[in-house]
């Protein structure tokens, strides 16, 4: 019994263990990697993907997907730039609100398309939405890159705490991301809505017949994914100082976010995944990118390594489930 | 000439159940052989043994006098046994030819598909059955009648000697039934044997040469159809006594909880009227497809009601969605436990609280202490065998899973409990526990409605029984009436309307 519990804990910590091993390996190869300032860099580089992956996770748990989170982030950033360019508004609160509303409304539309129009799978509707949003961002800014955001807007992506004395500071973006993760943790585990999200992913029919409004749950999930995307968009603006409307189609935003969730134990079949697993997944991706950059490896190598990690992570997960299944069968016989 | 197919002492077991015991049957060439029995009598098991889906533990199968062992469906096909299932094996996107030659394509010299020959042969076979269609058209464009013919054509092209037809008329219109009958008679002339499984006695009398009755997994009789009549067949199907496996407490019926007044949902149920009272178990009997589950779905807001009125506690109401039903105090233990009752990849506790967030999550915030209290209480009172409520519900046995579904609804503060096939696929011990739960609910003054295809269960547990057929109520029988017996219920279920 105790052994079983120990094994359970070990299993839960396995991804964390993998992350630790990865960090140790990176440190051994490039001593630079383990410096305090570089660690902060890794965290800084994790934030955008973390925000996007948080929203992606919610959709994956419902057995869905949101392929529009990246272009939604860029559109949310472009919406702020549009207010500045077209109306000369520079009040940071108004701009931030604009971004959050834009992202959330897009997510809401995704949810409505899925539930009310009954499109077969959100893969289709959000794929379409990805292109629409990319075009919309280019359209409202007439394809121009806009700079000159007020500090109130850029702070989320660029500010650092406790800076000074050779220390580059602790990135606010990562702290904000952690706060969001804690909120999502509570949402998923401590609210009726959160449990409904898992239930919808596991068996929508049984959930509906239990008296839960599954449409409402799904619309919430996609709206929340849109909200998270908007936060990512704000961080992108802060880090780069500009809103570049063409960034949506050139980045790997969606695939990075999916990768973080999948490495962290989420599954396309739904009903599975935790926010802490996603955090580890997102950190792993940044560690690999950062470490390989320090080793002067170009993006070609980085892509291949990340790809291999995704496949290995899922393969291990599948093997583990299969062996658990086998053990259970043997125990019953 | 000997029988085409012969079974001797064939037994098929599953863990804890004998699905078919020492079954024997002989099917002659050029014979239409009827097969009937109640739901769960072992007909499907027999079909699956004949088609190589199941491998029996004991007994022998002979095809044209030669002993055969079917390791898989392919073996049975090779031996000349084909089956037209109720759910046709048709791929709607492909042409009729593609469907007919699926798995046995004809190729030309260079290894490409020889459509010219295949179209010609497909047309030829269908022609010989009197079906004139363009075989190059997509299967999805045709109705069930034609598609069934395509399935039969498939069997003929494989040179089948025995064609099993499982409830072939259940999805056909009248003219299509006539066509099928004609084709079946024609096949008989050609010397093909037909095993005709049906719920409709009149069809058996019209079509069959001999009939075999099964009950409880056993062979009861095989007789020429001329020597049988309705009464004899029904008695052979049900003839058994209800023993003490039903711990029935006779209820003290109170006020009317639910009333259906001439409720119609077009295409499923028609002018259904009944009353269900607090403090009683109202049973729904009938054959599969009689409209019982649909009636339950109508109660639960999961089937649109086109005409008629539903009353809850004497007041007319409209229940629009399952969510609406739950808030009005209706609980629905669904027939399909895994598909509709449970979220298998979530924990036992998560499943138990799904219909009672109002109590365990006031204001939307889950109270872990309350969740634990509720789930521990369920596990104890329902005797769900698990060390921990956090285990996945998918890992439980069927009986324990069913208890979780019931537990979910007991937590929902409902007053009307619908149980649809509550003991399907669970072992005898767990069945008794489910019956006891129903008794408890009744003694608490709840209204219990039970749909069951097992007549002994209906008779054993109900205070009153509604018999349905073809979406309509055929009879309503009280526990103390002389008609409260298997024969009379079966007669009603088979279409003899009771004088009211």
Image (cartoon, rainbow, N blue to C red):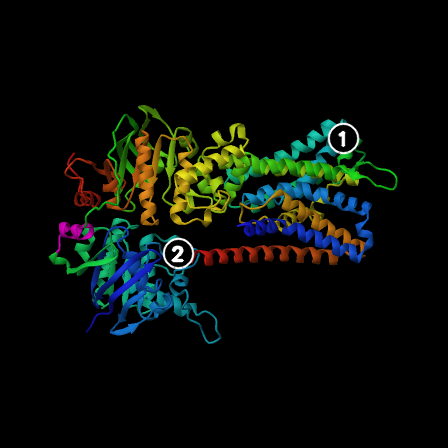
For label 2, count other residues whose C-alpha is less than 10 Å away and answer few (under 14), some (14-19) or many (20+).
Answer: many
- What chain does mark 1 sit on? A
Q: CA distance from mark 2 to mark 1?
A: 59 Å
Give the answer, above or below, for where A149 lies relative to B236. above
Q: Is B381 on the left-hand or right-hand side of A31?
A: left
x, y percentage for residue B98? Answer: 41, 63
Q: Is residue A279 magenta?
A: no
Residue nearest the observer in this picture, A87 or B295: B295
- Which residue, given by chain and number where applicable, does mark 2 sit on? B139
Range of residues picked out in magenta = B228-239
Residue B335 tag number: none
Instruction: Answer with the quarter of the image where residue B294 lies.
Output: top left
Q: State which quarter of the image contains the N terminus of chain B.
A: bottom left
Residue nearest the observer in this picture, B199 or A250: B199
Q: Can residue A116 be seen in this snapshot?
A: no
Residue at 34% x, 46% y: name it: B430
Instruction: Answer with the quarter of the image where residue B215 lies.
Output: bottom left
Q: Is A63 on the left-hand or right-hand side of A93?
A: left
x, y percentage for residue A99? Answer: 69, 33
x, y percentage for residue B29? Answer: 22, 68
Give the answer, above or below, for where B189 lies relative to A65. below
Q: Is B421 on the left-hand or right-hand side of B4?
A: right
Instruction: Answer with the quarter of the image where residue A100 lies.
Output: top right
Q: Are marks 2 and 1 on the same chain?
A: no
Residue nearest the observer in this picture, A175 or A326: A326
- For the image, the number of numbered tags is 2
- Which residue, given by chain and number where applicable, does mark 1 sit on? A84
Q: State which quarter of the image contains the C terminus of chain B.
A: top left
* Callout 2: SS: helix
């Amino acid at each position: 019994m105790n052994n079983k519990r120990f094994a359970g804990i070990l299993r839960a910590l396995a991804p964390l263990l993998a992350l630790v091993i990865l960090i140790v390996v990176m440190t051994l190869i490039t001593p630079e990697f383990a410096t305090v300032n570089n660690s902060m860099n890794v965290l800084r580089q994790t934030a955008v993907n973390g925000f996007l992956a948080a929203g992606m996770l919610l959709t994956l748990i419902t057995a869905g997907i949101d392929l529009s989170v990246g272009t939604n982030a860029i559109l949310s950033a472009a919406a702020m730039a549009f207010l500045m360019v077209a109306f000369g508004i520079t009040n940071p609160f108004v701009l931030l609100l604009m971004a959050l509303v834009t992202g959330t409304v897009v997510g809401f539309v995704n949810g409505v398309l899925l539930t009310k129009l009954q499109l077969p799978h959100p893969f289709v509707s959000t794929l379409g939405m990805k292109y629409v949003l990319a075009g919309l961002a280019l359209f409202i800014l007439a394809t121009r890159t806009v700079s000159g955001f007020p500090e109130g807007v850029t702070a989320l992506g660029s500010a650092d705490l406790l800076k000074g004395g050779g220390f580059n500071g602790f990135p606010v973006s990562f702290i904000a991301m952690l706060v969001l993760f804690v909120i999502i943790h509570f949402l998923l585990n401590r609210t009726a809505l959160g449990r409904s999200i898992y239930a919808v992913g596991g068996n929508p029919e049984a959930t509906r017949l239990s008296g839960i409004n599954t449409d409402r749950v799904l619309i919430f999930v996609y709206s929340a994914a849109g909200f998270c995307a908007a936060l990512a968009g704000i961080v992108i603006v802060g880090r780069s100082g500009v809103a570049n409307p063409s960034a949506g189609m050139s980045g790997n935003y969606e695939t990075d976010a999916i990768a973080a969730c999948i490495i962290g134990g989420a599954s396309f079949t739904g009903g599975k995944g935790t926010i802490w697993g996603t955090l580890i997944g997102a950190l792993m991706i940044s560690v690999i990118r950062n470490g390989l950059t320090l080793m002067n490896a170009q993006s070609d190598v980085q892509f291949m390594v990340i790809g291999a990690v995704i496949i290995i992570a899922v393969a291990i997960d599948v093997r583990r489930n299969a062996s658990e299944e086998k053990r259970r069968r043997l125990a019953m016989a | 000439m000997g029988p085409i197919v012969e079974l001797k002492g064939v037994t098929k077991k599953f863990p804890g159940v004998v699905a078919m015991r020492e079954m024997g049957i002989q099917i002659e060439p050029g014979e239409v052989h009827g097969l009937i029995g109640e739901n769960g009598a072992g007909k499907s098991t027999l079909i699956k043994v004949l088609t190589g889906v199941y491998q029996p533990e004991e007994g022998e199968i002979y095809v044209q006098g030669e002993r055969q062992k079917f390791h898989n469906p392919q073996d049975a096909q090779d031996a000349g046994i084909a089956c037209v299932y109720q759910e046709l094996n048709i791929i709607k996107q492909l042409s009729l030819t593609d469907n007919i030659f699926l798995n046995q394509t004809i190729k030309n010299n260079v290894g490409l598909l020889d459509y010219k020959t295949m179209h010609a042969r497909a047309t030829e076979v269908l022609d010989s059955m009197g079906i004139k269609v363009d075989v190059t058209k997509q299967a999805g464009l045709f109705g069930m009648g034609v598609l069934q013919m395509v399935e039969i054509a498939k069997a003929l092209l494989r040179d089948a000697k025995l064609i099993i037809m499982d409830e072939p008329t259940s999805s056909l219109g009248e003219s299509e039934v006539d066509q099928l009958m004609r084709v079946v008679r024609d096949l008989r002339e050609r010397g093909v044997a037909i095993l005709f499984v049906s719920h409709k006695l009149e069809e058996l009398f019209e079509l069959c040469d001999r009939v075999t009755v099964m009950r409880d997994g056993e062979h009861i009789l095989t007789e020429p159809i001329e020597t049988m009549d309705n009464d004899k067949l029904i008695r052979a199907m049900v003839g058994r006594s209800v023993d003490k496996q039903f711990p029935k407490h006779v209820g003290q019926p109170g006020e009317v909880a639910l009333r259906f007044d001439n409720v119609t949902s077009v295409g499923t149920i028609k002018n259904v009227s009944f009353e269900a009272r607090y403090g009683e178990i109202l049973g729904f009997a009938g054959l599969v497809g009689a409209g019982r589950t649909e009636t339950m779905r109508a109660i639960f807001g999961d089937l649109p009601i086109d005409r008629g009125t539903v009353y809850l506690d004497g007041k007319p109401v409209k229940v629009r969605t399952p969510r609406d039903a739950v808030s009005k105090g209706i609980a629905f233990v669904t027939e399909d436990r895994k598909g509709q009752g449970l979220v298998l990849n979530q924990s036992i506790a998560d499943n138990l609280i799904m219909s009672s967030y109002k109590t365990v999550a006031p204001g939307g915030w889950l109270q872990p202490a309350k969740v634990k209290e509720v789930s521990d209480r369920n596990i104890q009172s329902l005797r769900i065998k698990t060390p921990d409520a956090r285990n996945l519900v998918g890992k439980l046995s069927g009986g324990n899973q069913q208890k979780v579904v019931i537990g979910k609804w007991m937590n929902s503060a409902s007053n009307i409990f619908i149980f649809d096939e509550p003991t399907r696929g669970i072992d005898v011990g767990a069945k008794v526990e489910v019956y006891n739960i129903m008794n408890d609910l009744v003694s608490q003054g709840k209204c219990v409605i039970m749909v069951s295809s097992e007549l002994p269960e209906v008779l054993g547990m109900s205070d009153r029984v509604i018999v349905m057929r073809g979406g309509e109520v055929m009879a309503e029988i009280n526990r103390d009436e002389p008609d409260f017996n298997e024969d009379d219920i079966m007669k009603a279920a088979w279409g003899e309307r009771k004088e009211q």
